[in-house]
Amino acid sequence: MAAGTRIAVLRERASGETRVSATPETVRKLIGLGAQLAVESGAGSSASIADADYLAAGAEIGTAEQVLAGADIVFGIQGPDPSLLGPVRPGAWIVAGLDPFGQHGRVEAYAASGLEALAMEFMPRITRAQSMDILSSQSNLAGYKAVLVAANIYGRAFPMMMTAAGTVSAAKAFIMGVGVAGLQAIATARRLGAQVSATDVRSATKEQILSLGAKPIFVENVAGIEGEGSGGYATEMSEEYRRAQAELVSSHLAKQDIVVTTALIPGRAAPRLISDAQIATMKPGSVIFDLAAPQGGNVEGCVADEVVERHGVRIVGYSNTPAHLPADASALFARNLFNFLSAFWDKEQGKPVLDEEIGNAIRLTQGGKVVHERLLA
Ligand code: NAD
């Protein structure tokens, strides 16, 4: 990469994707570092950003081919189609959410083209990388949106209301999985006036649930994951734990109006938390939002992007929840990418230079090969 590193920002091509990987704010900041920015025409339109806004921020606007010509870095929300990438510099970086386990073929194609693919979702959970973490920034918004969507579908109100015509009782909301999305779901449901309870397998979340004014529902007789779990992540639970959890959750679920599930295990299908038999015990009119729908779902019968009715309970889940808040989701995602490049920007070389800890954690391909240990294993 020569001085004046060229960064290309493409229009996202995946169906349902509304976000964009740079905003006028981050374009300005990246130019401030010494980069050149080239944005594909229309890239920001679904996130309410016009070409003129990028131009005013100092970017050049063009077709995909024009913006990719000579690019040193290609930004994306999702991984760009390898067949578009002919015009980039040899060894160019692809900086995006690359879905490494789901998009094996694409990762192979980046390798075959000699590109260096950097999967932003593999950002390690260390303090200095927090501001670069796309999973956190997007999950936070997703947790918020999940509650709003459930509230919208629900045929009753969330807060308790005392009216001249009588009292409306507060909705009972239960959040399963208390990571970034779950914490925001708890906070949002509380703000709307619901009575909130929550569960997780990681014991550290109990305090967090209490601090948000919600009630923790935890398996007590079988050990869960001590503390935060490794890197803040859960693992698959034992058969004994799962049985105890199902039993505990069953009696609780039957009393809930709103359920938001968020449980994920990195690199695996989402754990099944709610069965059809459990749904049958719930009150008709209840709503379940399954935030794990894109990873296979926590809820039996959930179909992404559809409202499915089972036993009078409506089950919803989006295949891409952050894409339902395109402007904010883009703003945060774009800042994650800026924070990442700026942390590693080498002024003398006029380009970013990664260190080992973060570089090795996120680098999928280099020198024509797939190099990431989690993909080689
Ligand atoms: P996640 O999206 O991987 O999973 C969501 C939640 O589901 C987690 O809390 C997980 O424990 C839970 N879960 C998994 N299996 C379950 C099951 N069978 N039943 C119930 N719950 C289950 O998690 P996340 O939102 O990415 O965050 C996890 C932790 O990592 C949080 O404590 C967060 O604060 C921390 N974190 C740290 C950093 C950082 O330091 N840079 C960045 C992001 C997140």
Image: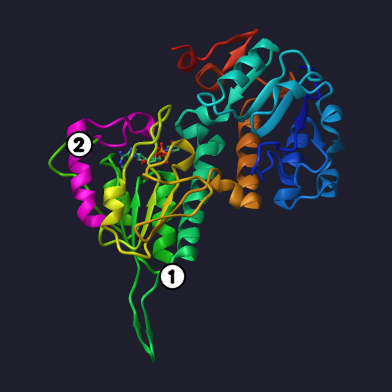
Q: Is residue 247 magenta?
A: yes
Q: Marks 2 and 1: CB-CB under 8 Å? A: no
Q: Quadrant of the C terminus?
A: top left
Which circle marks residue 198 in the picture? none
> The residue tagged with tag 1: helix, strand or loop?
loop
Location of mark 2 (residue) = 241
Whole-percent x, y for residue 211 in the image: 32, 56
Decide: is 146 above or below 373: below
Comes first in the chain, label 2 or label 1: 1
Whole-percent x, y for residue 11 in the image: 75, 38
Location of mark 1 (residue) = 155
Q: Ligand 1, what quadrant? A: top left
Please identify the residue farthest to the bottom as the structure is shown: 164
Question: In this rendering, which labeled residue sits more in front, label 2 or label 1?
Answer: 1
Q: Residue at x 69, y 31 (%)?
A: 75
Decide: is 112 above or below 77: above
Q: Is residue 121 magenta?
A: no
What amino acid does circle 1 point to? Gly
Decide: is 239 above or below 283: above
Query: Seen in the image, is 21 located left or right of residue 307?
Result: right
